[in-house]
Image: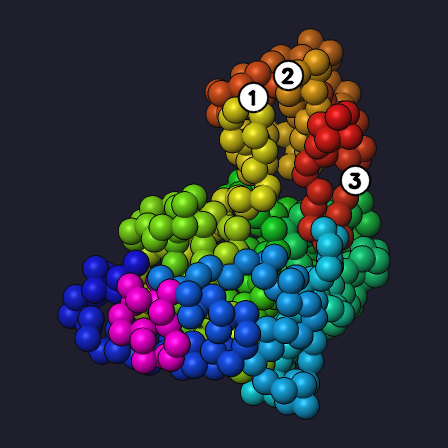
């Protein structure tokens, strides 16, 4: 993706600065055997071999598997005595991916997050309740340091203990909530049952991320919590939260200048501005663990240019799905977000579960959708009518037949972190 296509009046200056930054990152990783070997294969032996953005786009992609193969510290660009913090993924599908930060990296991260939060309207007068997980997960600590850099008051409550979350939200006068969107919805649901009035809270802003969510879910959260919800994007392998965040215009997430984004098709070829594909990111100015052309597996669209908020640069649309969230059912690509949108449009609660199983050699999809307390006591005929309408809408969207199963209120497990949306039984069934 060539900057010359986006801002012809500033091509020379912007591309020269970007190339300088990218060469610096290439130079930093070249001593690392993994990068050295893969770059040598395409004739890149020194940073000066990168003479254009197109040269940079020839570099091999970095994957999560590359990180696991070099576990734990094989891709670090600084000696361990310069590393002041380690974070890691959960490692649910194998060895965790480990990332390291120098003191300068931590300071840079804090400034990036602070700038993003300020753009969303957070100020030093705010009380920010961080209900992302703390520990090896980057979510809690990344936002924590950013809020302190901004000068806001931090409530580092982490995830879970919902009753206590609501009590402190009221007693501490929390104005900003930071967590996953699915947990925000659970908090809203719990608030309605807690006896605490919404009027007792001072909430005004929500910073939600770490999982794909739809515009319908945003509207649901905003209505039930009485806030403005902002989508935040980040991933541990690149830095953590703060790679991108929405501004009040809600026309996409503005990507911080310390990251260079690309959009690729399924074959790994660059796509032009405005086309949907997989997001690939390079970290710039990161010392301890710089990563070049990292495959995020997140599907989105990039735009370049000015925004009414004053930002000028790359903007990404909300992540609509993840490549690895995609289900292939009878040859059709299915994403949970498509089903969620249909469920919300038909007025159901955004609590659902996709169960994939096999009958004979044929894949089947069951969509379990939770009804609320009021709907649960409706006439059977009325419930059947709503179920039929939902079935038709989902089948129209997906292009395959599905089974709809309406389930009792609160029967689908709630999540204090990333929501579980899919149970795939096909492998277990052989």
| Residue 13, placed above or below residue 68 | below
> Disc 1 vs disc 2: Cβ atoms closer than 8 Å?
yes
Query: Who comes first in sequence, dot 3 or dot 1?
Result: 1
The residue at which mark 2 appears reads as 362
Q: How far, Cα to Cα, is label 2 from label 3?
A: 28 Å
Residue 47 appears in the figure:
yes
Q: Is residue 45 magenta?
A: yes
| Residue 6, placed above or below residue 143 | above
Q: 220 or 44: which is nearer to us?
A: 44
The residue at which mark 1 appears reads as 330
Query: Who comes first in sequence, dot 2 or dot 3?
Result: 2
Q: Position of residue 59 (x, y in %)?
A: 40, 64
Residue shown at 47%/47% (left/top)?
299
The residue at which mark 3 appears reads as 413
Q: Position of residue 76 (x, y in %)?
A: 60, 77
Q: Residues within 10 Å of mark 2 (few under 14, many from 20)?
A: few
Q: Quadrant of residue 368?
A: top right
Q: Secondary structure beneath disc 3?
A: loop
Q: How far, Cα to Cα, is label 3 from label 1?
A: 28 Å
Question: What quarter of the picture does the C terminus occupy?
Answer: top right
Q: Which residues are magenta?
A: 42-57
Q: Secondary structure beneath disc 1?
A: loop
Q: Position of residue 354 (x, y in %)?
A: 67, 31
349 with respect to 275 (left or right): right
Residue ranking furthest to the left: 9
Q: Is residue 374 magenta?
A: no
């Amino acid at each position: 993706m060539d900057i010359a296509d986006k801002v012809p009046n500033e091509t020379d200056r912007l591309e020269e600065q970007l190339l300088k930054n990218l060469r610096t990152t290439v130079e930093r990783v070249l001593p690392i055997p993994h990068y050295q070997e893969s770059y040598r294969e395409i004739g890149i032996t020194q940073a000066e071999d990168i003479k254009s953005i197109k040269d940079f786009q020839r570099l091999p992609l970095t994957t999560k598997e590359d990180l696991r193969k070099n576990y734990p510290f094989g891709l670090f660009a600084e000696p361990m005595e310069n590393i002041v913090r380690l974070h890691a993924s959960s490692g649910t599908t194998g060895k965790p991916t480990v990332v390291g930060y120098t003191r300068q990296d931590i300071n840079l991260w804090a400034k990036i997050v602070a700038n993003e939060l300020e753009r969303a309207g957070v100020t030093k007068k705010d009380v920010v309740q961080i209900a992302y997980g703390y520990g090896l997960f980057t979510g809690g600590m990344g936002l924590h340091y950013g809020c302190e850099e901004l000068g806001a008051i931090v409530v580092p409550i982490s995830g879970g203990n919902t009753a206590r979350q609501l009590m402190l939200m009221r007693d501490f006068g929390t104005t900003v909530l930071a967590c996953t969107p699915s947990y925000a919805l659970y908090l809203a649901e719990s608030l309605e049952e807690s006896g605490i009035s919404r009027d007792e809270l001072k909430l005004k802003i929500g910073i939600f991320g770490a999982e794909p969510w739809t515009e319908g879910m945003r509207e649901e959260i905003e209505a039930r919590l009485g806030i403005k919800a902002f989508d935040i994007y980040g991933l541990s392998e690149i830095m953590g939260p703060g790679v991108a965040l929405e501004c009040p215009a809600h026309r996409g997430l503005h990507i911080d200048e310390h990251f260079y984004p690309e959009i690729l098709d399924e074959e790994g070829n660059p796509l032009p501005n405005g086309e949907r594909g997989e997001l690939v990111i390079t970290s710039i100015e990161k010392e301890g663990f710089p990563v070049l052309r990292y495959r995020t597996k997140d599907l989105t669209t990039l735009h370049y240019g000015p925004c009414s908020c004053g930002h000028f640069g790359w903007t990404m649309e909300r992540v609509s799905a993840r490549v690895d969230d995609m289900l292939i059912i009878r040859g059709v690509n299915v994403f949970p977000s498509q089903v969620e949108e249909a469920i919300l449009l038909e007025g159901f609660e955004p609590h659902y579960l996709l169960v994939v199983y096999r009958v004979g050699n044929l894949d089947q999809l069951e969509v379990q959708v939770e009804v609320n307390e009021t709907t649960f006591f409706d006439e059977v005929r009325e419930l059947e009518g709503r179920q039929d309408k939902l079935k038709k809408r989902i089948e129209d969207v997906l292009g395959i037949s599905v089974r709809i199963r309406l389930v009792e209120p609160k029967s689908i497990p709630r999540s204090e972190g990333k929501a579980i949306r899919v149970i795939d039984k096909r492998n277990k069934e052989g």
